[in-house]
């Protein structure tokens, strides 16, 4: 493990210990996004590809600046990922019951 790896390890261990010892209060929005992070990971690329393709096809850059398109795409992908995460969480009890019946 190189110096960067050791430094990263120490940083993560230190922040984890600090969170445990000080009862660090995480903002609800960040906690929500963290809970939906895997769904965000799965959903963001297909959503961004579709949005960018549509934006190019309809020449949205003529009306909306590139920064506006970028922010919209990121926020839309974030919303889709969070909604997907909610749906998965809502169905989790059904999934557990299904798996135990197999």
Image (cartoon, rainbow, N blue to C red):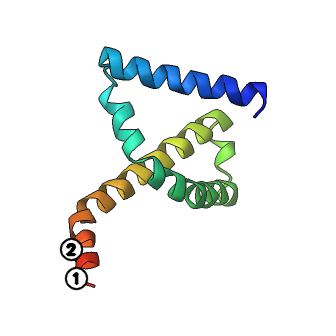
Q: Position of residue 39 (x, y in %)?
A: 45, 55
Q: How many marks?
A: 2
- In the image, residue 45 above or below residue 76: below
Q: Position of residue 88 (x, y in %)?
A: 33, 61
For the point 48% across and 21% down, the residue is: 15
Pointer 2 and pointer 1: residues touching (CB < 8 Å)? yes
Please state which of residues 37 and 45 is positioned toward the viewer in this rendering: 37
Give me the disc on residue 101: 1
Local secondary structure at mark 2: helix
Q: Quadrant of the C terminus?
A: bottom left
Residue to which mark 2 is pinned: 97
The outermost residue toward the top is 22
Q: Position of residue 94 (x, y in %)?
A: 22, 71
Q: Quadrant of the N terminus?
A: top right
Q: Is 50 positioned to the left or the right of 88 in the image?
A: right
| Mark 1 crowd level (few <14, some 14–19, many ≥20, 10 Å Cα) | few
């Amino acid at each position: 493990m190189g110096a960067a790896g050791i430094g990263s390890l120490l940083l993560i261990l230190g922040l984890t210990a600090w969170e445990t010892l000080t009862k660090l209060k995480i903002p609800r929005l960040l906690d929500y996004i963290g809970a939906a992070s895997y769904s965000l990971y799965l959903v963001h690329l297909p959503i961004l590809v579709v949005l960018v393709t549509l934006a190019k096809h309809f020449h949205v850059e003529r009306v909306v600046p590139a920064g506006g398109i970028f922010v919209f795409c990121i926020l839309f992908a974030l919303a889709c990922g969070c909604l997907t995460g909610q749906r998965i969480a809502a169905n989790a009890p059904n999934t557990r019951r299904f798996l135990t019946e197999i």
